[in-house]
Image (cartoon, coloured by chain):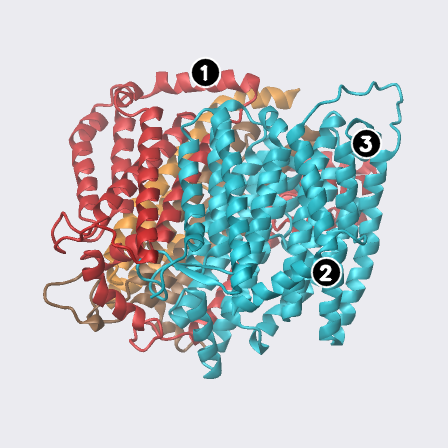
Chain colours: A red, B brown, C cyan, D orange
C-alpha cells in the first residue's frame, strides 16, 4: 500500500511538471492510469473519497487533494521568491531611481519636449507621443480592444443546438429578474449619469491640453453607460444603444482611425504636405488630427467597455 | 548586496508585484485568481517602467506657462508606453474572463484541474 | 531626405489595408466576409512578392518611417529580403490554409460567426505583417498581443468544450510569455533609453564596452528569449501546444502551427541580430537556448511516437521541429541563422500541409483520428493522402524535399562551427531522423493499408477544388524548397546581410 | 511626500499578498481594485497624471467592473446549476 501511495504521488508530481500547474495532457493521463492496476487503484480512490467528504471543499477526485497540499503552496511561494530575488538583484544593479544621469533621460526627452508643441500642437506631450510619434503602437492598441470584443462575441456564440434555447431562456430570465425599482440606485444614476458622461467628454476633448485623452475618457463614458444600464431596465438603454449601434459606431470609428492614420503615415513618410493645420497650441480646436483621433478612440473604448460588460452580464448582446 | 535597492522602493515594489502575479498566474488553480495574477503582473511592469521615467524635482510632461527648458520635465515616453500597455492588459483580461465564464457555464468549476478531469471523463 | 518609391509604400498599405478589412468584415454578410478574407490574403501574397523582388534586385533594405519623424523618435518599419521572404511565406500559407479549409469552414463555423472569424483573420494578417516588418520592440509587443488573442479566437472557432479549455491553457501560457517579454523589454529600455533596433543595438554595444550593467542586460535578453520560447512552444514550455493544435479547425491549426508560432521566432532572430549582436554576450543566452533545443528535438519526437491519434502526433512533431529551428538560432553563427530561417520555411510548408491533409483524412474517417480508423482513407481521399505522404517525407528529410535541404544546411552550419556543438547537432539530427521515420512514415503507411472492415462502402467522393489547389501548390512548394534550396538559402543570406 | 509614497507602496504589496492568500474571490477582486487605486496615486507622485487617470478609469475601474460582472454571472450559474449538478452526481 505504501508503494501505491508513492506511485500516486509521483504521478501527480509528473502531472504538475508536465503542465506547470495546469491540467495533465489527456493521453499522458491515460497512460498513467493504465499503469496502475485497476482494482487497488479504485479502492484507494474510494477511500480518499470518504476522507475528502469530511473536508467539505475538496471535490470528488483524489488529485485535487494534492493541489491543496502544503508543499504545493510552498512551491508557489518559492517560485515567487526566487523570481523576486533574481529581479531584485537586477534592479539593484540598474541605474539609480530618480537621478538625472540615466541613459533614458537622453536625447529623446529633449527632442519630445522641444518639438511636440510645434509639430503636433499638443500641450500634453504624452498625447502628442501616443497619437503622433508613436501612432502606430496606438493604432495597434485600439485594434487590440476590437479583437477582444470579437473574441468574446465569438466565444459567446459557441453554443450547441440545445444550449441555444437554454441561453435564450437565461437571457430572458436576466431581463425578467433585473431590479426594476431600486429607488436609491435609480435616483443616484439619474443624477450621476449625465455628470459622468459630461466628465468623460471633457476628458476626451481636452486630451491634447491636459491629462487624459481618448482611452481614459472613453473608459469613463463606458462606466457611465454601465451605471445607467445597471440602474434601469435593458429596455430603456436599448432605446439608444443596441448591438447595432455598437457595431456601427465602433466600425466607423475604427475605419476613420485606420484611414486617417494611414494618410498621416503616408504623407509623413513621403514628405508630402498633409494639409492638416495644427492651429494655435493651447486652444481647444488645435492639434490637427489629435482631437478627432481622441474622439474616435473614446468612442471605441466606450463601446467596447459597455459591450464587454453587457456580454458578461447577459451572456449575449 | 541589497544596499541600493532601498533607494529604489518603486522598483522593489514593482518587482514584488510582478513576482506575486507571475506565481499566481502560473501556479494558482483558480481561474479567477489567475486572471487577477495576470493583471497584477502587468501592473508591476508598468510601475517599473514609469518609475524609471521619473526624475526627482521635474514636472509632469505637460507644458507649463513659460517653461520650455527640456530639463524641466520628466521623460514622457514611458508614460506613453504604459498607457498603451494598460489598455492592452484590459483587453486580454476581458478575453480571459469570457473564457472563464464559458468554462464555468459548461463544467461548473473554476478549478483548472477539476475542469481537465471533467473533460477527460467526457471524452470517454 | 529621400522620398519613397512606389513599392516602398507597400508595407504601409498592407498593414492599414488589413486593419480596414478587419473593421469592414464585421459588418458584412458571411459570404462577403469570406470573399474579403480570401482577397486580402491573396493581395498580401502579391505585395510580399513584389517587395521580395525589389529588395533582391536592388540588394538593399529600406526604412519606412510611420509619420514625419523616424528613428529614434517615432515608429518605423524596415523591410529587407529576409523580412520579405518570410512574410511571403506567411502570406502564402495563410492564403492556402484558407483555401484548404474553405469547404470545412462552412461546416465548422456557423454563418453568424463567420464575420467575426473574418475580422480575427484580417487582424492576424495585419499583426503578421507588422511583426515581420517592425523595427521597434514595443510595436512588436502590441502586435504580439493581437496575435495572441487572434490565435485564441482561432482555436475557439470550433464547437467543443474541449477547445475552450485548450484556448484557456493557450492563453495562460502565452500571457506568461508576453509578461516576461514585456518585462525584458522594459528593462532593456530603461538601460539603453531606446526602443528601435538600430539604436538599441548601438546602446547595448556601448554599455557592454564600458562594462556597465552587464547582469541586467543579460537578464533582460534572457527574459525576452524565454518569453518568445514559451510563446513558440520550445520544449519544456510546449504544454499548451498539442491540445490547441489538434482540436481546432483545419484552417486554424494550419495557421497556428506555421504562421503564429513562427512569427515569434522570426522576431527573436531580429532581436538577436539587431539588438544583441552576435558576439560573446549573445553566446551566453544562446547556450541556454541550445540546451533546451537539443533536448526538445528528441523529446518532441518521443512524445510524438507514443501518441495514438494522428492530429496529436502531428502537433507533437511540431515541438521537435521547433527544436530544430532553435538549434539553428543557438548555433549563433550567420550560417546557423540562415539554416534556422530556411527551416522555418521548410517546416511551415510541410506542417500546414500535414494539418490540412490530416483534417481532410480525419473527416474521411468519420471524425476519428486513431490509427486503426484511418486505415484505407487513402482510397477515399487520394490527394490528401498523397499530400500527407509528401509532408511526412519532407519532415523526415528525404532528398528533393524541403526538409532534407534544411537538415543539410543545419548540419553544414554545425560542421562549420565545429567543436562539441557540431557533435551534438549531428547526433541530434541522426537520432531525431530515425524517430521521425518511426512515427511519420508509420502514420503515412497506415493511410495506404486497406481498411479492416472491407464492407465499409466508399464514401461519396466530394469535389473540393479549393482544397485540391491548395494541396498541389503546397506539394510544389515543398518540392521547390528542396530542389532550389541553394538559391533560397542565398536569398536568406543576402537578407541577413541586409539585417545589420 | 516620501512617507506617502512608502505607505502606498507597502499598501500595494500587502494587497498583492492578500490577493494571493484569500480564497474568497470577491474579496480578491476588491483588494485588487484597491491596489489599482493606490497605484494611480503613486503615478501622480511619479509625475504622470495621464497614467493616473487612465489607471483609475481603466485599470481599477472598468477591469474590476468586468471582473464583478463575471463573478456575478458565475454566481448566477452556480445557483441555477447546483440543483442540476446534484442530480447528475446522484446518477
Residue drawn at 58 percent across, 25 percent down: C106
User: Please, is residue D74 above or below residue C180 in the view?
Assistant: above
Q: Secondary structure at mark 2?
A: helix
Quickly name the residue at label 1: A169
Which chain does the residue under circle 3 lie in?
C
Nearer the observer, disc 3 or disc 2? 3
**Left or right, C391 with reference to B88:** right
Q: Residues within 10 Å of mark 3 (few under 14, many from 20)?
A: many
Quarter of the image containing the N terminus of chain A? top right
Q: Secondary structure at mark 1?
A: helix
Q: Residues within 10 Å of mark 1 (few under 14, many from 20)?
A: few
Where does the image place residue B110, in percent across and percent down from the top left?
53, 37
**Left or right, A165 with reference to C469:** left
Depth check, front residue: A104 or C132: C132
Quarter of the image containing the C terminus of chain A? top left
Quickly name the residue at label 3: C378
Which chain does the residue under circle 2 lie in?
C
Which chain does the residue under circle 1 lie in?
A
Asked if marks 2 and 1 fall on the same chain, the answer is: no
Quickly name the residue at label 2: C295
How many numbered discs sit on the rendered protein?
3
Depth check, front residue: C203 or A44: C203
**Left or right, C87 with reference to C212:** right
Where does the image place residue A217, in percent across and percent down from the top left?
24, 43
* CA distance separating discs 3 and 1: 46 Å
Residue C169 quadrant: top right
Residue drawn at 35 percent across, 57 percent down: B81
Please indicate, yes or no, whether residue B96 appears anywhere in the rendered image.
no
Nearer the observer, disc 2 or disc 1? 2
Amino acid at each position: 500500500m505504501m508503494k501505491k501511495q508513492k506511485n500516486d504521488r509521483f504521478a501527480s508530481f509528473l502531472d504538475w511538471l508536465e503542465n506547470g500547474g495546469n491540467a495533465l495532457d489527456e493521453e499522458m493521463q491515460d497512460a498513467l492510469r493504465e499503469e496502475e492496476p485497476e482494482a487497488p487503484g479504485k479502492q484507494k480512490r474510494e477511500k480518499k473519497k470518504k476522507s475528502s467528504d469530511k473536508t467539505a471543499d475538496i471535490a470528488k477526485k483524489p488529485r485535487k487533494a494534492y493541489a491543496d497540499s502544503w508543499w504545493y503552496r510552498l512551491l508557489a511561494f518559492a517560485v515567487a521568491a526566487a523570481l523576486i530575488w533574481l529581479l531584485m538583484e537586477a534592479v539593484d544593479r540598474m541605474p539609480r531611481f530618480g537621478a538625472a544621469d540615466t541613459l533614458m533621460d537622453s536625447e529623446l526627452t529633449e527632442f519630445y519636449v522641444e518639438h511636440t508643441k510645434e509639430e503636433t500642437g499638443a500641450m500634453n506631450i504624452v498625447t502628442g507621443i501616443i497619437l503622433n510619434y508613436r501612432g502606430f503602437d496606438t493604432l495597434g492598441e485600439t485594434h487590440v480592444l476590437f479583437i477582444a470584443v470579437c473574441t468574446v462575441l465569438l466565444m459567446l456564440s459557441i453554443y450547441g443546438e440545445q444550449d441555444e434555447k437554454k441561453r435564450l431562456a437565461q437571457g430572458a430570465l436576466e431581463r425578467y429578474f433585473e431590479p426594476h425599482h431600486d429607488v436609491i440606485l435609480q435616483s443616484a444614476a439619474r443624477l450621476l449619469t449625465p455628470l459622468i458622461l459630461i466628465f468623460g467628454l471633457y476628458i476626451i476633448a481636452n486630451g491634447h491640453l491636459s491629462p487624459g485623452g481618448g482611452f481614459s475618457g472613453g473608459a469613463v463614458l463606458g462606466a457611465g453607460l454601465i451605471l445607467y444600464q445597471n440602474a434601469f431596465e435593458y429596455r430603456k438603454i436599448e432605446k439608444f444603444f443596441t448591438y447595432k449601434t455598437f457595431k456601427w459606431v465602433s466600425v466607423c470609428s475604427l475605419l476613420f482611425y485606420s484611414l486617417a492614420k494611414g494618410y498621416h503615415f503616408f504623407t509623413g513618410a513621403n514628405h508630402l504636405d498633409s494639409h492638416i493645420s495644427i492651429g494655435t497650441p493651447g486652444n481647444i480646436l488645435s492639434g490637427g488630427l489629435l482631437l478627432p483621433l481622441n474622439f474616435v478612440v473614446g468612442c471605441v473604448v466606450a463601446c467596447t467597455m459597455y459591450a464587454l460588460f453587457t456580454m458578461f452580464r447577459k451572456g449575449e448582446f | 548586496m541589497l544596499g541600493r535597492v532601498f533607494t529604489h522602493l518603486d522598483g522593489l515594489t514593482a518587482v514584488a508585484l510582478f513576482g506575486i502575479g507571475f506565481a499566481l498566474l502560473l501556479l494558482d488553480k483558480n481561474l479567477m485568481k489567475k486572471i487577477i495574477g495576470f493583471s497584477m503582473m502587468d501592473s508591476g511592469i508598468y510601475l517599473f517602467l514609469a518609475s524609471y521615467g521619473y526624475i526627482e524635482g521635474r514636472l509632469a510632461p505637460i507644458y507649463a506657462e513659460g517653461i520650455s527648458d527640456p530639463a524641466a520635465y520628466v521623460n514622457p515616453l514611458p508614460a506613453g508606453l504604459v498607457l498603451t500597455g494598460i489598455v492592452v492588459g484590459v483587453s486580454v483580461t476581458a478575453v480571459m474572463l469570457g473564457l472563464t465564464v464559458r468554462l464555468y457555464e459548461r463544467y461548473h468549476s473554476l478549478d483548472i484541474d477539476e475542469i481537465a478531469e471533467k473533460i477527460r471523463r467526457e471524452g470517454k | 531626405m529621400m522620398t519613397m518609391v512606389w513599392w516602398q509604400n507597400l508595407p504601409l498599405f498592407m498593414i492599414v489595408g488589413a486593419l480596414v478589412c478587419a473593421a469592414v468584415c464585421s459588418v458584412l454578410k458571411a459570404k462577403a466576409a469570406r470573399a474579403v478574407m480570401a482577397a486580402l490574403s491573396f493581395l498580401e501574397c502579391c505585395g510580399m512578392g513584389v517587395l521580395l523582388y525589389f529588395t533582391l534586385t536592388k540588394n538593399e533594405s529600406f526604412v519606412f518611417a510611420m509619420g514625419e519623424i523616424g528613428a529614434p523618435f517615432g515608429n518605423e518599419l524596415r523591410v529587407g529580403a529576409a523580412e520579405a521572404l518570410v512574410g511571403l511565406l506567411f502570406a502564402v500559407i495563410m492564403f492556402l490554409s484558407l483555401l484548404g479549409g474553405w469547404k470545412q469552414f462552412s461546416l465548422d463555423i456557423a454563418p453568424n460567426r463567420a464575420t467575426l472569424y473574418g475580422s480575427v483573420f484580417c487582424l492576424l494578417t495585419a499583426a503578421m505583417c507588422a511583426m515581420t516588418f517592425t523595427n521597434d520592440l514595443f510595436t512588436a509587443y502590441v502586435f504580439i498581443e493581437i496575435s495572441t488573442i487572434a490565435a485564441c479566437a482561432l482555436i475557439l472557432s470550433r464547437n467543443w468544450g474541449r477547445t475552450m479549455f485548450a484556448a484557456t491553457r493557450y492563453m495562460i501560457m502565452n500571457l506568461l510569455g508576453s509578461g516576461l517579454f514585456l518585462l525584458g523589454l522594459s528593462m532593456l529600455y530603461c538601460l539603453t533609453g531606446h526602443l528601435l533596433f538600430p539604436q538599441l543595438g548601438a546602446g547595448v554595444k556601448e554599455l557592454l564596452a564600458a562594462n556597465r550593467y552587464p547582469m541586467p542586460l543579460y537578464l533582460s535578453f534572457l527574459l525576452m528569449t524565454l518569453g518568445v520560447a514559451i510563446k513558440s512552444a520550445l520544449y519544456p514550455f510546449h504544454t499548451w501546444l498539442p491540445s490547441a493544435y489538434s482540436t481546432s479547425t483545419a484552417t486554424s491549426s494550419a495557421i497556428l502551427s506555421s504562421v503564429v508560432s513562427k512569427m515569434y521566432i522570426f522576431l527573436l532572430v531580429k532581436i538577436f541580430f539587431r539588438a544583441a549582436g552576435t558576439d560573446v554576450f549573445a553566446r551566453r543566452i544562446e547556450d541556454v537556448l541550445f540546451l533546451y533545443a537539443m533536448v526538445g528535438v528528441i523529446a518532441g519526437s518521443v512524445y510524438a511516437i507514443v501518441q495514438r491519434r494522428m492530429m496529436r502526433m502531428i502537433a507533437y512533431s511540431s515541438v521537435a521541429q521547433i527544436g530544430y529551428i532553435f538549434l539553428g538560432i543557438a548555433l549563433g553563427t550567420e550560417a546557423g541563422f540562415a539554416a534556422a530561417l530556411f527551416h522555418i520555411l521548410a517546416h511551415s510548408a510541410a506542417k500546414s500541409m500535414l494539418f490540412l491533409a490530416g483534417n481532410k483524412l480525419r473527416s474521411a474517417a468519420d471524425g476519428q483520428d486513431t490509427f486503426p480508423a484511418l486505415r484505407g482513407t487513402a482510397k477515399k481521399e487520394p490527394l490528401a493522402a498523397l499530400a500527407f505522404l509528401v509532408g511526412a517525407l519532407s519532415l523526415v528529410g528525404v532528398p528533393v524535399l524541403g526538409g532534407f535541404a534544411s537538415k543539410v544546411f543545419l548540419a553544414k552550419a554545425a560542421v562549420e562551427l565545429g567543436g562539441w556543438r557540431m557533435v551534438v547537432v549531428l547526433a541530434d539530427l541522426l537520432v531525431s531522423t530515425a524517430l521521425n521515420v518511426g512515427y511519420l512514415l508509420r502514420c503515412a503507411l497506415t493511410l495506404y493499408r486497406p481498411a479492416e472492415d472491407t464492407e465499409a462502402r466508399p464514401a461519396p467522393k466530394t469535389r473540393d477544388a479549393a482544397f485540391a489547389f491548395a494541396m498541389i501548390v503546397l506539394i510544389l512548394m515543398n518540392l521547390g524548397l528542396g530542389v532550389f534550396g541553394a538559391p533560397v538559402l542565398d536569398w536568406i543570406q543576402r537578407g541577413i546581410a541586409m539585417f545589420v | 511626500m516620501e512617507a506617502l509614497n512608502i505607505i502606498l507602496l507597502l499598501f500595494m504589496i500587502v494587497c498583492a499578498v492578500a490577493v494571493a492568500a484569500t480564497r474568497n474571490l470577491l474579496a480578491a477582486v476588491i483588494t485588487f481594485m484597491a491596489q489599482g487605486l493606490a497605484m494611480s496615486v503613486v503615478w501622480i507622485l511619479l509625475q504622470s497624471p495621464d497614467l493616473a487617470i487612465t489607471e483609475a478609469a481603466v485599470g481599477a475601474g472598468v477591469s474590476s467592473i468586468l471582473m464583478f460582472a463575471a463573478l456575478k454571472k458565475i454566481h448566477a450559474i452556480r445557483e441555477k446549476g447546483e440543483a442540476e449538478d446534484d442530480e447528475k452526481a446522484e446518477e
